[in-house]
Image (cartoon, coloured by chain):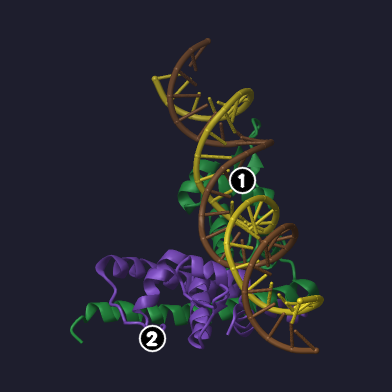
Chain colours: A green, B purple, C brown, D yellow
Amino acid sequence: MRIGELARRTGVSERSLRYYEKQDLMTAERTPGGHREYGEGSVDRVIRIQELFAAGLCSEKIAQLLPCMRDSDGGPLRTANGQLVSDLTVERERIDRMIADLLRSREVLDEVIEAASVPAE
Amino acid sequence: MRIGELARRTGVSERSLRYYEKQDLMTAERTPGGHREYGEGSVDRVIRIQELFAAGLCSEKIAQLLPCMRDSDGGPLRTANGQLVSDLTVERERIDRMIADLLRSREVLDEVIEAASVPAE
DNA sequence: GTAAAACTTGCCATTGATGTCAGATTCAAG
DNA sequence: CTTGAATCTGACATCAATGGCAAGTTTTAC
């Protein structure tokens, strides 16, 4: 499929898909004319990339992480080296804190929303 | 206390504290000379603000939300109006998605970290 | 073959919280 | 009073992903 379809199917803009390629997060075959040609696996990969972006990882970390994930792209499964494991552990802790934070904030929102729905108090 | 101490006690930069004021997230008394003078409650308030920022809310939403939170600043407890409740509900759903996302990403990290710690497989 | 749609690269803009610097003023202590 | 530390305001920079535009090329449909 080409970039337009991939964008439609993933909900990620074409602009971002090109950016992902430049950041070495994904590759694409090229037609003789130079247009990108994606395989089916690209859909999952893009979604995974989006999730990791949403989790606050930067392009560089994601690029290092992807080859170590199973179901990544059918490529050889790499094992994370010491430095990467160390980095990912830091990220993991950050994510933990973020989850705790989100849970607290969600509670706050719930309280306010709840209070508004029970005006007679 | 003055801004330096508040910054130290909350881990938030002086720059950000002044920004919070400009965004109407908090107020401060002023000394005759114009220096900010914060009460004890400011510490909690700053921490709360930070949490909400971390949860992805923008200044404007936080500014609307704060007066509706208990233990906010001793001011009168406002009840969220319909528009705000609607906005907060949207935020709540976004937070839910974010949490789900983070849990998935954390799992991914755990798998990769785990795989690296068991090289013989 | 022609026209429209899709795609290409490259560049500049945006966002929103925060960093940083400069010059001026105030505060606290000697 | 003086001096150094702290604070003030205001302006400009940063970051990282994304948006948007322009000019040119490829593809697709007729």
Task: Pick whichever, B89 or B36, lies toward us.
Answer: B36
Residue drawn at x 18%, y 84% as measured from the top left: A120
Asked whether residue B12 is in view, the answer is: yes
Task: Pick whichever, B36 or A48, lies toward us.
Answer: B36
* Classed neighbour count for the residue bearing mark 2: other residues with Cα under 10 Å, few (<14), some (14–19), many (≥20): few
Given the image, what chain letter belongs to the residue carrying mark 2?
B
Q: Quadrant of the N terminus of chain B?
A: bottom right
Gap between marks 2 and 1 measured at Cα: 51 Å
Q: Position of residue B29 (x, y in %)?
A: 49, 78
Residue C19 appears left or right of A81: left
Quarter residue D7 falls in: bottom right
Tell me, yes or no, whether dots 2 and 1 are on the same chain. no
What's the residue type where badge 2 is placed?
Answer: Gly
Residue drawn at x 31%, y 82% as measured from the top left: B77
Q: Quadrant of the C terminus of chain B?
A: bottom right
- Helix, strand or loop for disc 2: loop
In this view, the mark in front (2 or 1): 2
On residue B2, the disc is none
- Helix, strand or loop for disc 1: helix
Residue C28 appears left or right of A17: right
Residue A119 appears left or right of D11: left
**Residue on which disc 2 sits:** B74
Is A111 located above or below residue B102 in the figure?
Answer: below
Q: Position of residue B22 (x, y in %)?
A: 50, 65
Q: Position of residue B76 (x, y in %)?
A: 32, 82
Asked whether residue A73 is in view, the answer is: no
On residue A18, the disc is 1
Q: Position of residue B102 (x, y in %)?
A: 53, 73
Given the image, what chain letter belongs to the residue carrying mark 1?
A
* Classed neighbour count for the residue bearing mark 1: other residues with Cα under 10 Å, few (<14), some (14–19), many (≥20): some
